[in-house]
């Protein structure tokens, strides 16, 4: 069966990473004849893995179909030239109507379950309404599909309530961990000398989005230094020239606390093992997610994890994580400082992390679950 895998709009975050991992598995699967419509960032990540990227299997989209009419036309034409019997868009919308069956993954939480609290982070009423209008357009484009795949039951049910699409068109295939990442971490765990590294590292992975909650960190730091003499450092991964980092940097400078937070800039996925292993605590203050891979990555690394007290996070992390309200700097500062007393996981915590990881499975299992679903849908 000819399948066009479309990730032409995925340029950052989990959509980029999951697309690359899916392609890595698909290239070793002879059961399907694949063609890959990829964004430039996805293609560059694949190149770093030293894969054989045959030109006849890949079409690169330097401009996203989300904002470029020519790219949208090119995407539709590609599906015709390839003779695609099915198009699978990993993280939609795709912004086009394909001439064949279209199965669309939806992992954008603004489309499925964003609430007003998150929209308020966008700024004034004009900015809120502007982004709500943008999200509404994205939502309408999701109707250009035949079937839909979500990463959680929560996202599926929320989308169904908003879209009124029949449940028999909606499916769930959860996110997963990368087993190669887990194996690398297992080889290097507990190798750091805490005497040589007396500063506690608090790793905050995430892309340049306001709903990730990184703007609350300066106030959290200001509270923490009132109550602990322990040296600590937050590590962010934002673009150095981003408005969000400039906002955070200015507040750090105004509070004279720049020594407590650094921005290492965006990392490539191949650097993740080093970042996780050199950290003591993983802090994910995001107020809106569908399924953050950072949760599972913290479990793979056997690190303490503190996340926003939100239902989507609790569904995944269960009792493994510590929950807080990132907008409450006093509460969050207290909970992070409390973790300083014992940075090692108990046997029970490690066991629970393993159970959660086994529950969701690795990327190889996810790939097989997705392709089995695509195969079944193609016969309808």
Image (cartoon, rainbow, N blue to C red):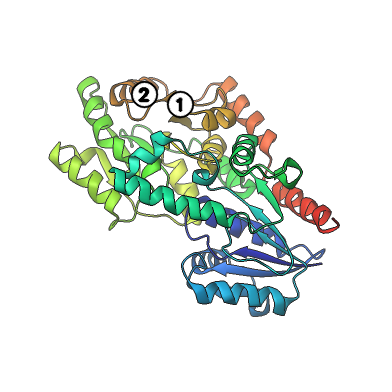
Provide the secondary structure element on which disc 2 rests.
Answer: loop
Residue at 33% x, 36% y: name it: 197
- Please tell me whether mark 1 sits on a helix, a strand or a loop: loop
- In the rendered image, which residue does mark 1 sit on? 309
Residue that protrudes farthest toward the front in the picture: 164
Say whether residue 8 is left or right of residue 164: left
Q: Is residue 306 visible?
A: yes
Residue 120's spot in the image, x, y percent? 35, 38
Task: State the CA–CA distance, disc 1 to disc 2.
Answer: 20 Å
Do residues under tags 1 and 2 come within 8 Å of each other at their CB atoms? no
Say which of 196 and 226 sits in front.
226
- The image quadrant of residue 307 is top left
Is residue 58 placed above or below 29 in the rendered structure? Answer: below
Report the residue at 37% width, 36% height from top.
Answer: 202
Q: Is residue 208 visible?
A: no
Across and down, in percent, residue 65 comes to 52, 68
Name the quarter where the N terminus is drawn. bottom right
How far across and down, in percent of the image, does residue 244 sit? 29, 49
**Where 188 falls versus 139 (above or below)?**
above
Residue 128 figure quarter: top left
Residue sitting nearer the eye, 138 or 42: 138
Q: Is residue 139 above or below residue 58?
A: above
- In this rendering, the count of numbered labels is 2
Q: Which label's residue is closer to the chain start, 1 or 2?
A: 1
138 relative to 144 in the view: left or right: left
Q: Nearer the viewer, residue 272 or 100?
A: 100
Q: Which quarter of the rendered picture does the C terminus lie within?
A: bottom right
Mark 2 lies on residue: 340
Identify the residue at image location x=73%, y=51%: 370
């Amino acid at each position: 069966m000819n399948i066009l895998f479309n990730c032409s709009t995925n340029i950052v975050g989990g959509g980029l990473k999951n697309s690359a991992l899916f392609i890595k598995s698909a290239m070793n699967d002879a059961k399907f004849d694949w063609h890959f419509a990829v964004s430039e960032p996805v293609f560059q990540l694949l190149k770093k893995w030293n894969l054989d990227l045959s030109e006849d299997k890949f079409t690169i989209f330097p401009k996203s179909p989300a904002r470029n009419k020519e790219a949208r036309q090119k995407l539709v034409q590609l599906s015709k030239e390839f003779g695609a019997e099915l198009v699978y868009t990993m993280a939609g919308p795709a912004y086009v109507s394909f001439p064949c069956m279209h199965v669309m993954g939806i992992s954008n939480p603004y489309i499925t379950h964003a609430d007003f609290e998150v929209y308020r982070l966008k700024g004034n009423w004009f900015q809120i309404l502007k982004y709500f209008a943008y999200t509404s357009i994205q939502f309408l484009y999701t109707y250009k599909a035949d079937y839909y795949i979500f990463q959680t039951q929560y996202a599926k049910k929320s989308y169904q309530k908003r879209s009124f699409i029949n449940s028999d068109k909606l499916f769930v295939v959860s996110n997963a961990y990368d087993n190669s990442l887990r194996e690398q971490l297992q080889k290097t765990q507990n190798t750091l000398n805490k005497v040589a590294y007396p500063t506690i590292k608090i790793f905050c992975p995430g892309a340049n989005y306001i709903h990730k909650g990184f703007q609350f960190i300066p106030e959290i730091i200001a509270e923490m230094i009132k109550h602990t003499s322990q040296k600590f450092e937050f590590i962010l991964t934002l673009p150095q020239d981003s408005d969000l980092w400039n906002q955070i940097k200015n507040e750090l400078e105004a509070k004279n606390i720049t020594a407590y937070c650094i921005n290492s800039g965006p990392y490539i996925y191949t650097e993740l093992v080093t970042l996780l292993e050199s950290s003591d605590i993983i802090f994910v203050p995001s107020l809106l997610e569908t399924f953050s891979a950072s949760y599972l990555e913290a479990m793979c690394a056997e690190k303490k994890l503190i996340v926003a007290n939100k239902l989507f996070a609790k569904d995944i992390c269960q009792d493994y994580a510590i929950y807080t309200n990132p907008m409450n700097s006093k509460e969050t500062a207290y909970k992070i400082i409390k973790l300083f007393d014992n940075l090692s996981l108990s046997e029970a915590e490690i066991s629970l992390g393993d159970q959660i990881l086994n529950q969701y499975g690795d990327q190889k299992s996810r790939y097989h679950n997705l392709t089995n679903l695509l195969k079944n849908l193609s016969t309808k």
